[in-house]
Image (cartoon, rainbow, N blue to C red):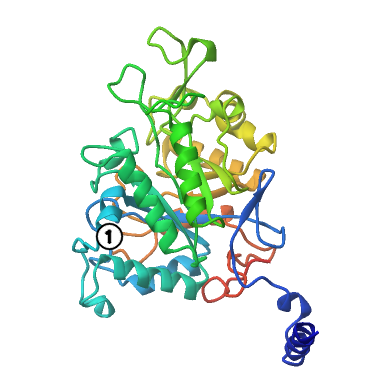
Amino acid sequence: MKWRALGLTLIAGLAMSGLSAQAASRPKSDWLHTKGNRIVDARGKTVRISGVNWFGYNTGTNTFDGVWTANLDKTVKSVANHGFNTIRVPFSVQLLKAWSQKKYPQANINLSTNAALKGKNSLQIWSRFLADCQKDGLKVIVDIHSAKSDPQGQNAPLWKAGRYTTKDYYAALSWLAKRYKKNDTIIGYDLKNEPHGMVTDSSYAKWDGSKAANNWRYIAAKAGNKVLKANPHALVFVEGVQVTPKKWATGYKKSAQYNYALWGANLRGVAKYPVKLKKRQLVYSIHDYGPSVAPGSSWVQGNFTYNSLMKSYWRPNWYYIHANKKAPLYLGEWGGYLSGSNLKWMKAERKLIKTHKLNFTYWCLNNNSADTGGLLNSDWTSWNSKLYRFVKPALWQSKKGQFYGLDGQVKLGTSGLRKP
C-alpha cells in the first residue's frame, strides 16, 4: 500500500506540474530491442536510426578526426541540429585493448579550439563526447572497424590481424559493453566492419553452419552473446560477408561457384544459417556503395535503375530479410559524390531508405574520406550544403519537418524532437 500511495502521489505531482500522463509513463531509459523487421523502444513504438559516421578512433588519431581543427562540443551539437540522431563511431581492437589496460595513446587534438580537453587522455575525451551526445539528444553505435589502429586497417578481412587475436577481439567488446552497460547513450555495437575476402585469398570470412575459425556467422554469434552478457539491452549489429556459395552443398571450395557482394554486404546465408542470439537484439547490417566506391560492381554497370538494383542485388543479398520481416536492417554505411552515375545511384539508395523506412548512418561526417567525400567542408566546421540537402530528406522527421531523436527525455539538438 505504501508503494502504491507513493506512485499515486508522484503521478498527481506530475499532473500538477503540467506534465501529461503520457510523459509520466515514458520510460526513463532509451534501450531498444527488435520486433519483426522493426527497431522498437520499451513501449513497443517503432523508432528509426538516421545517423552519420564520424571516424578517427580507428585510425591512430585516437579521437575523432577534425578536432585537430574544430571544437568537439560544437561539432556534436551541429550534428544534432542538422537532424542526425545517431553517430556511428569506428574503433580498433588495438585502442580498446590499450584502454582496458589503462594505457591511453595520445589523441590528436587542437587545444586552442578545445581548451576544455586540456589534460584529458583519449578515453576521457571519449567520455566527454558521450556526455555531449546525451546533452544534445544523440545516440551512439560503437563499430569495431579494424583490429589495428590504422587508416587502412579495414582492409584486413577478419576481426583479427597481426598480434591482435580473436581473443583480444572478444575481450575488447566485452570490456566496452560492461563499462557502459548503464549508459543508454550507447545503444548498440556493430560487431565487425565489413568482413570480406575471396576463397582464393590467404584469409577470408565465410558464412555457414560450421565452427571454423574464419566463419563470421559463428564468431558473430559468440561475440554478440558476450556483448549481451555484459549488457542485455544493447542492440547487436551483424554485417555479412563478401561471398557465399551458390549451392551450400558445395561448401567453400575453390572449385565452387559463388554469389558476390560488396564487403560485408552478402547476407544470403541468413536464409539458411541465421545468427542466433539469446535476446531480441539482433539487427543485420550492410554497407552499400555506388560507382564512385565500387566501380567494377556488375549491378552498377550500364543503365542500372532502382528496379534493377532491387532485383539483381539488394533483394537477393539482404533486402529479403526486411521484406520477410525476419529482422531489422541497418545501412551502416552509404554515401558518395553527387556526380555522374554515382548521383544516379545515390538517388536510388535514398529512395530505398525513404520508401521502406530503413535505418542508416551516412558515410560520413569527415571530409577526409577520399572515395566518398563528407558532410563537413575542409574547415571541419561548415557543412557541404549541397550534400546535406541531398541527405536531409532521408532523415527521420515529422510531417512538419522536425527531426526525431531516439531519446525519450531530451530533444534532438536545439529545435528537434524527442522520440514520439
What's the amino acid at mark 1? Trp
Residue topped by disc 1 = 99
Q: Position of residue 412 (x, y in %)?
A: 55, 70
Residue depicted at x 49% and y 41%: 238
Residues 307 and 191: in front is 191
Residue 346 visible to an observer of this rendering = yes
Instruction: Answer left or right for 146 relative to 356.
Output: left
In the current view of this chain or complex, which residue is farthest to the top?
255
Q: Is residue 392 above or below residue 326?
A: below
Quarter residue 115 falls in = bottom left
Instruction: Answer left or right for 268 relative to 264.
Output: right
- In the picture, the quarter occupied by the C terminus is bottom right
Q: Position of residue 186 (x, y in %)?
A: 48, 61
Residues 170 and 23: in front is 170
Q: SS class of the residue under badge 1?
A: helix
Q: Position of residue 151 (x, y in %)?
A: 24, 46
- Across the whole image, how many numbered discs are drawn on residues? 1
Q: Residues within 10 Å of mark 1 (few under 14, many from 20)?
A: some
Residue depicted at x 57% and y 27%: 273
Residues 325 and 28: in front is 28
